[in-house]
Image (cartoon, coloured by chain):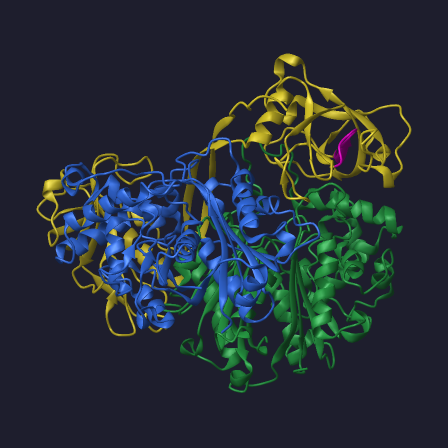
Chain colours: A green, B blue, C yellow
Amino acid sequence: MAQLAAVVGVGQTKYKTKRKDVSIAGLVREAAQNALNDAGLGWNDIDAVIVGKAPDMFEGVIMPELYLTDALGCNGKPMLRVHTAGSVGGSTAIVAASYVQSGVFKRILTVTFEKQSESNAMWALSNPQPFSAHLNAGAGGYFAPIIREYVRRSNAPYDAGIKVAVKDRLHGAKNPLAHLQLPEITMKEVEDSPMLWEPLRFLEACPSSDGACAMVIANEELVAESPGTPAWIRGSAMRSEPTMYAGREEVNPQAGIDCAKDVYKQAGISDPRKDLDCAEVYVPFSWYEPMWLENLGFAEVGKGWELTMSGATSLDEGGDIPWNCSGGVLSSNPIGASGMIRFAEAAQQVRGLAGAHQVEGAKTALGHAYGGGAQFFSMWVVSSEKG
Amino acid sequence: MREVAIVAYAQSDCQRDAGAQNEVELIMPVLQEVYKQAGLRNVQDVDFTCSGSCDYQQGAAFAFVSGVDALGAVPPIKESHVEMDAAWALYEAWLKIQMGMADSALLYGFGKSSPGELPIVLSQQLDPYYLAPLWVDSIAFAALQARTMLDQGLISEADMAEVVARSRRNALQNPHAQLKGEFSVEELLAEPMYESPLRRHDCCPVSDGACAMVICTVEKAKEWGKPYAVIKGIDHRIETHHIGSRDLTRSVSTELAAEAVGVNNGKVDIAELYAPFSHQEIILKRALNLGDDTVVNASGGVLAGNLMMASGLSRIGEVAMRLIAGEGKRGVAHATSGPALQQNLVTVLEAQ
Amino acid sequence: MSSAAEILSQEFTLGYTYTRSTGPVVGRFLTGLRNREFVGIKGSDGRVLMPPMEYDPVDAAELSEFVSTADCGEVVSWSWVSQPRDAHPSDKPFAWALIKLDGADTPMLHWVDAGDESAMATGMRVKARWAEQTKGFITDVNGFVPESVALVAEYVANEAEEPVSGIEAPIYLKYQFTAGQATARYLVQLKNGKLVGQRCPSCSNVYIPPRGSCAACGVPTQEEVELSNKATVQSYTIVYIPIPGNPIKPPYVIANLVLDGANLSFLHLLSECNNDDVRIGMRVEAVWKPEEEWTHAMENIKYFKPIDEPDMPADQIGKLKEEGR
């Protein structure tokens, strides 16, 4: 029943610690305009705009899409704002796709952003309220114990995280838009970087970035109006579970497992490592690569780190299933956009437009995002083939 | 288009201050009520769940995350959230049903506005360089709009008072309403100005609460054997944020949405309009081209109690329940967001 | 089940001074204000938009043609605020107004100091009252006044030469926060030196701190269960960075602890041990502050410290139910 839909335009900003040259509207507009340019379209060609971002406290503008209406050429059109924590970039892409897949709209624009330099990420994510959790050591403080439990269970070597930190930065050095540009990074440099939340070191954590990411999604009829190869949306899925409940599996969350199964089924994928050519997966802390390799079915439980250590996920080492060729969240992290960047980079790979970080001949790719206490998941599979 | 049925709807009382009830405690009773109405055990019995809320209402990031605690989302569920009124959560779910990804959905909206100074909190949804630093409160925009209407002779103060008098009177029949009573237009006009030309009663009150709804395909509603109302059309539009570029006497985005869903393709028996200020009900009636034969805001509307982030969904639920109860054959529900009706959603519903 | 909970309420401020970059258009307008002049922008249809928009409201074009206007004009609409709020730009009654400056085609929103509502009228002429010291911010216009009002001001020259490219926006919102019923009950007991969780009526798991619901089952929880001071380390991290506003010096240990009889962990500090000795499964107990310092907060427990009991196997942590259930 769902109509076919494809990504026909992708636009991103350069990711930086501070984009001091633009207003919030200017930042968002830059990505949106780039997406329209990529799709060979103008503002009048867009039927609706779907906006996503993480908590409004980052910029201190409540429901900023109201103010962004004019920057996004949305006067007189439908606009919707999604917020599903860190997974929001991915969820927004999925909601945006549903505008077209439902048959209600022909072509839409979707944009996500964060201008984190306007405040402080740690403050914005966990501004203290009376009578609430008394201890807060940031996202790293929350995820580090979960990583420790993963290491205990899997007997992973101490440097599996370090390997991911190096690999993703080397990938990022091939992506001119990536925030961190560390082409000379070494295992030793990561290992010697300051410990923040043991076992996570400074260079094993994501940066805080300003940036925006946009996509144009069109139905089958209008795909041909844009140049180049479209990225057909072959499957999309979302799953949520509560942050905390008795017996919750935090290392290998059920919501992630279910979400992956759902999206693979839609896309006809039986063995993700074999059937996918690459993946853009939300890895804000190095160890989440081996953990998600298992959660997403690329490796058996307990064996994700072996895949990482073998170089299978590395473009430079000629791995068979490169992960995060764009440099991933470890190289650029405007939180509200980070999920959409994964989805958009997956699209760029199958469109053959990923430039120096292109996986040769990539046809099918996974985009993945997660948020909250690793409880909200969104994923899509895109392909150069309609299916 | 697949026809979508509303099979259950519940709203909490509009309370000025829900005190020691947190979001989860506000949501849970309305969820239990819609499960009961629809004959569901829990959230696991629907295909999709979507909610609407705003972090700044209570002043904490991720308000909706605690909302998930009320659901029983184990095993994990297909769930999403809009940082908007839950009417737009309904829209998101409606799209999911159109594309065949879901046959049923649970929706809820919630808000606890009492902890903050709402008109000032909402000043921060304005342009962050030109308006938010002046702390232009949400009432100011409405007041400027009302003055423009009065100056142009499009409404009178008595027209505004008449809207309020009818809201208060209708609210007498609504157990969830916060403000109700018999007031004459003369009594209301004798009240002092608040932010002139608005009197306090021209402005909706601040309320805490939640609402929930279950929708599904018509086939599913029949399978469940539940009475229902049908969503015949739903559309939403936004307009410029540049206040000086807007014709404040009209709601252009409502007009566009109304046209898109064919509001005037048939007689409208009942309408629920999200008009937080009395004069806006008149603007909306005109934008929707509703005549005197349409019963408007039989619930009292949001002037009788305004659950920010839930009121829009509540308008749709109110119309659906009235159609199910046989109060009419065709109804229109409207939701709004932003300063002076910047963004609007219009739904056309029909009785089974 | 205990009696109705005490209502715990406390004021707090959600606030940050945001640093905003303006981009060229907003920056040009604010630079103008700093120089006590208004700069609008020409829209796609030739109208002069005030304040200047970066993008045209009709055709979304990027705009760049600046146009200077007068600093006086006509009130198009207004609203009288008889009781200003704390955040408002004036502490005495004032008007919000849409003001069409001479030379602009769209009105802008600002405020008017007219003294009394009777001095306000649609169509009246007003002029900007410039701040004595400007800084490139919307409040450089210290409101408008009726054109007939004589302004005597000693302007402080602004020496800045660089165009405005950023502003500081202090946004501090006050909230009167009230704890939920379950939290209030829990905190009241904590003030009495007791750790009291809640049991789910459906799956019988025990939650502490209780949230008023079992997130897994989606049902309200009410039955209260007093738990012991002993707990097991489910996992932990050694933190090397300071917590904002917290006096503890790094490195320190934050552990996920499961109290005996509970089925869910919470975070707390671990102390009185070598950080290197901490391990999953380690048994610990609460070290309370002196009773006179107890309040409605988990900080009543200073930290947890190791006790001389054998480690709990990792797969049993949090899984043990109370005997007989």
Seen in the picture, residue A130 relative to B59 is either above or below; the reply is: above
Q: Position of residue C246 (x, y in %)?
A: 62, 31
Q: Is residue B213 left or right of residue A379?
A: left
Say which quadrant the C terminus of chain B sits in.
bottom left
Please tell me whether the stretch drawn in magenta is mainly helix, strand or loop: strand
**Residue A104 visible in image:** yes
Residue B96's image quarter?
Answer: bottom right
Camera-nearest residue between B163 and C190:
B163
Q: Position of residue A309 (x, y in %)?
A: 86, 61
Q: Residue furthest top?
A: C292
Seen in the picture, residue A342 relative to A63 is either above or below; the reply is: below
Q: Position of residue B143 (x, y in %)?
A: 23, 48
Q: Is residue B239 left or right of residue A144?
A: left
Q: Is residue A182 left or right of residue C28?
A: right
Stretch in magenta:
C253-263
Residue at 66 percent across and 45 percent down: it is: A243
The magenta stretch spans residue C258: yes
